[in-house]
């Protein structure tokens, strides 16, 4: 976080940015919804978080495939491949803000 940033606000806005970006209806790179079958790359998350007011730098992004029914997650990956008929969905993002 920038020195004068409120960590709680920064975390809240970072979570909002992530949920917005991964929204199947309004997210995605063009903001018109996540394209069916488009994979998720960890590298594309950095600019989403970096754009949040008060973020100085983003040091690490970890992606996990998750089962929303069981809550089970896989280990971290650099890319989440999606089947051609599948969409992303925002699920329990976690953000750590360091001051």
Image (cartoon, helix red, strand yellow):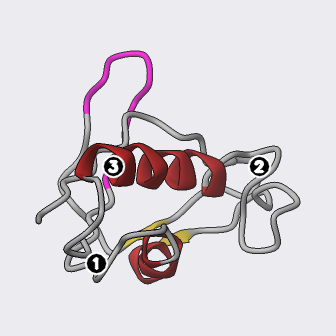
Residue density around tag 2, few if under 14, some if 14–19, many if 20 or more, within 10 Å: few
Pick whichever, 82 or 20, lies toward us.
Answer: 20
The quadrant holding residue 59 is bottom left
Q: Secondary structure at mark 1?
A: loop
Residue 67: x percent and y percent?
A: 40, 30
- Calculate the distance from the C-alpha at mark 1 to the C-alpha at mark 2: 31 Å
Mark in the foreground, 2 or 3: 3
Residue 46 - label: none
How crowded pointer 3 is (Cα within 10 Å; few <14, some 14-19, many 20+) is rated as many
Which residue is label 1 attached to?
A: 58
From the top left corner, tell me how far across and down residue 54 is, in percent: 38, 70
Residue range in magenta is 64-72
Which of the 4 image quarters holds residue 55?
bottom left
Viewer-side residue, 10 vs 84? 10
Mark 1 neighbour class, 10 Å CA radius: few under 14, some 14 to 19, many 20 or more: some
Looking at the rendered image, the quarter that the C terminus falls into is bottom left
First reached walking from the N terminus: tag 2 or tag 3: 3
Q: Nearer the viewer, mark 1 or mark 3?
A: 3
As for residue 57 lying within the magenta part, the answer is no
The residue where tag 3 is placed is: 11
Is disc 2 placed on a helix, strand or loop?
A: loop
- The residue pinned by badge 2 equals 85
* x 42%, y 16%: residue: 69
Q: Residue at x 50, y 81 (%)?
A: 47
Give the distance between the C-alpha atoms of the residues marked 1 and 3, in whole angstroms: 12 Å
| Figure check: 15 above or below 62 | above
Question: Majority secondary structure of the magenta segment?
Answer: loop
Q: Dividing the picture into quarters, in which one does residue 72 lie?
A: top left
For the N terminus, the image quarter is bottom left
In the rendered image, the residue lying farthest to the front is: 4
Residue 71 is covered by the magenta coloring: yes
Disc nearer the start of the sequence (1/3): 3
């Amino acid at each position: 976080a920038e020195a004068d940033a409120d960590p709680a606000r920064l975390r809240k806005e970072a979570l909002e940015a992530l949920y917005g970006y991964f929204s199947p209806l309004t997210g995605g790179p063009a903001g018109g919804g996540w394209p069916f079958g488009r994979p998720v790359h960890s590298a594309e998350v950095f600019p989403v978080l970096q754009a949040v007011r008060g973020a100085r730098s983003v040091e690490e992004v970890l992606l996990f495939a998750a089962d929303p029914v069981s809550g089970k997650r896989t280990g971290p990956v650099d890319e989440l491949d999606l089947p051609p008929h599948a969409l992303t969905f925002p699920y329990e993002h976690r953000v750590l803000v360091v001051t």
